[in-house]
Image (spheres, helix red, strand yellow):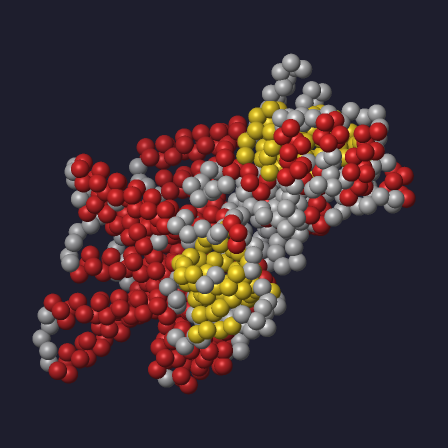
Amino acid sequence: MLLIVLFPKNNYSRSFLGILLGVLWMASVGHSYYSWQLPKEKIKKNVIIEASIVDDKYAEDIHKFILDVSVFDEKPVSFYAKVNGYYLYQRFEKGQKVRLCVRLSPAHGLQNPFAFDYWRWLVSKNIQATGYIVKCDDNELLIPTTNLSYRIRHRLAQGTPQGEKWLNAILLADRSKLNEADWALLQKTGVAHLFTLSGLHMAVVYMLCLWLSKWLFFTFRRLVRWESGVLLANAPQLLALLFAWGFVSLCGFPLTLVRAAIALSLYVVIVLRNHSMQANQGALLVLAGCLFVFPLSSLGISLYLSFFAVFILLLLIWRFQGPAHTFWQKCLNLVRLQFFLSGFMMLATGSVFQSLHWASFLINLFAIPFVSFVVVPLGCITLLMLMSFPSLGNTLADMLGAMLHQFMMLLDSVPTLSNSIVTFSGVWLALLFLLVVLMIPGIRYRIHGLLFVCLSIGLSLFSLSSSDKWQVKVFDVGQGSSMLIQSGKQAMLVDTGPSYRNRNSAAETIISPFLTAHKLTKNTLGVLTHLDNDHAGGRGFLSDNRIVQRWLSPYEGCVKGAHWKVGKLDVKVLWPSENDVKNNTLSENNLSCVMHITDGNISVLIPGDIEKAAENQLLSSDVDLHADILIAPHHGSKTSSTAPWVNAVSPQYVVFTNGYLNRWGFPHQEVVRRYRNIDSVIYTTAEDGFIQFSMSDTTDDNKKIDVETWFDDMNQRWYKSR
C-alpha cells in the first residue's frame, strides 16, 4: 500500500509489488499470532507465569488484567493474556512485573449475530489466552512501577479526591478506576469516546506544544540574536512532535493514541519536506502506517470509525470551505463542523452497534467542545506542572478534577430522550450514505444517492419479509441453553441462558439485540424448560424491559397435555405431569418441560435437562418421541441420553448446548458415541456457535432441512481453529 501511495502513476509492477508485500505482511502476522499456542496438557491447569501488566481494570471485587507474558511454566515465551483476579489480597497495577499462578484457556468467545464479538476483540488486541489468577503463595510482585506515569497517578490520588478517576482516564488513558455505574453513564450519554485518548487529544497536545515551542525558539533567537535558518524554522514542529510522542509514552502507548501519533508524524514529515500530496493519498499512507505497526487492529471497529471520522471531517471542510475573516466566522465554521460531524458519527455508531441514543447527539454538541478546548488544554498544563512543580500541579488537578466531577454529575442528571432505537444495519448505512452524498455538490450525485437508499431499504425489507420457512435458532450462550422457534412473524423463545453476578446476562447481550433487530419483541412467547440459572437466568431482564411479556414454565402451565400454536407450528408438551409438579416428587432437572414441535412433517424435540428417570417414564408412555432435530438433554451429560432414549428419538440432527471447555466435560464422549452410532449429525454451540435450522414446506418423502452455523457458514474467520 505504501508503494501504491508513493507511486500513484500507472506503474503496474510497483502496484503489484505493493499488494504482494501487503499480503505477505498480513500472512506473517497471522503466523506470528499462532506461533505460540497454549499446550493442551496445560489448558485450565495451574501454571506459573511471569508477566508485565499492560492494562488493568478494577470492578467491585474483580481485577482484570492484560499481561505481556515472558515466562510460562519456567520457559521463555512471548504472548498476551487476559486474566481476572477474584478477591486478591494484593492489588497489582499497570506497569508492574509480577509472578502469578494462573489457569489459562485459548482465546475464545461466544459467537452470535447482533452480539459483541469478544473473540474478535481478543485477536485485535493480540491476546492469545484468557483465564484467571489462582490464589497461591507464588503470586508476588517482582518489579514495582516506578515510571513517570505511575508517579503522576500517585500524585493525582494524593490531591484529587473528586474527579480523580475521570482525570486518569482523560489524561493518562487509565480507566482502571471506572466502575460499572461509570461505564453505564458513559454509554448512556454517548461520551465514552471522549475518555479514550485519540486523535482529538493528540491534536490539542501537538498544537499546545507547537505554540510553546515557537514561543521558546522565538525568545531564544531574540536573546542570542541567531539568524533564522531551515533548521531553526523546522525545530518547533520537531520539538512539538517529540513532546507529542512523550505524551504517548506517558500514557503507556494506547493503540488509539499511537495511531494518531503516526498520522501526526507523517503529516509533519510531509509538511517539512514540502511534499504535495492529495488528501486521499495521505489518508491511505496513514492507514498503511497504522496497519504496519498494529496489523491486528484491522479486526477492531475503532480503526474504521476513526478513519470514517477523518473522512467526514475532510468532506465537510471541502463542502463548506469559505472565507472566514473574522473571529465569529471562524467560530461559526467550527460549530457547523461539530454539528454535522456529531450527526454523521451518531449514525455510523448506530449502524455498527445496532443501538442509538438520541440524547447523545445533543450532549456531544456541548461535551466535545468542552473537553477539546477546556479539559484537554488544562489537563496538558496540569501534567506539565505535576512533572515540574508538583504543588502547583496538585492545585490545578484539584480544580480540574472538581470541574470534571461536576460535569459528569450534570450528564448523569440529563434524562435520555429515548432508551434506544435498534433497526436493520442496511437502513442505517443507506441513510448514512445518503447524507454523505448530499454533502457533495451536483444534482446528479444526489439522485444516484437517493436511488441507492431506496434500493437498500427495499432489499433490507425484502430480506426480512415472511416466507414459507420456519426456523430453529440455537444461541451460543456458554454453559446454558437458549433457542428461538420462529414461524412467520410469531416466535417462541425457549430458555434464556444464564445470568452472572458481575457481568451482563446472555439475555441482555445476545437475545435482546437479536429479538429487537428482527422486530420480534411483541410477538414472542417465553418458555422456560425449568428454573435453573443456566436456562432461566435472563427472564428478569427480558420481563423488566418488556421484551418478552408472557411466560410459561413447569410451574406456569408448561405441563403434559398443554398445547399451543406458533404460526403454523403445533407445540405439544409431553412432560412433566401436573401432579409431578405439585407433589415435587422429582428433581428440578427431571421436572423439565419437554416439548415436541412440528409442522406436520418435520419435528423438533426440546427436553430441557431431563435425566434417566424422566427418560424412562417417557419411554414407557405411549407418546411418539421421534424427532428430526433434538436439543440433547442436559447438555450431553452422561446422566441423560440413555441408549433406549437415543434409539427412540433417532434424530437426524443433535445439538449440544454447552460452554467452551466447560468444567463438567459436556458433552460426554459416551453420549456422543451413542448418537453417532445411529448416524446423527452432531453440532455443539461451543464449537459451532450460533446454529440455525431452516425448514420449508415439504412432503413425507422430502424433508428439507438447511443448517447454517456461525462458525463455518455465517462468520468465517482465519483465527478460528478447532
Q: Quadrant of residue 226?
A: bottom left
Relative image position of residue 369 (x, y in whole percent)? 41, 63
In this image, 38 relative to 179: left or right? left
Q: Residue at x 81, y 37 (%)?
A: 614
Relative image position of residue 148 (x, y in whole percent)? 38, 76
Q: Residue at x 59, y 58 (%)?
A: 415
In this image, 682 relative to 548: left or right? left
Relative image position of residue 558 (x, y in whole percent)? 80, 37
Relative image position of residue 677 (x, y in whole percent)? 64, 28
Nearest the viewer among 40 and 346 is 40
Q: Residue at x 63, y 19 (%)?
A: 703
Looking at the rendering, in which quadrant would you find the N terminus? top left
Inspect this view and state whether residue 566 appears: no
Nearest the viewer among 248 and 31 is 31
In this image, 613 relative to 544: left or right? right
Give the residue furthest to the bottom: 391
Residue 345 to residue 423: above or below? below
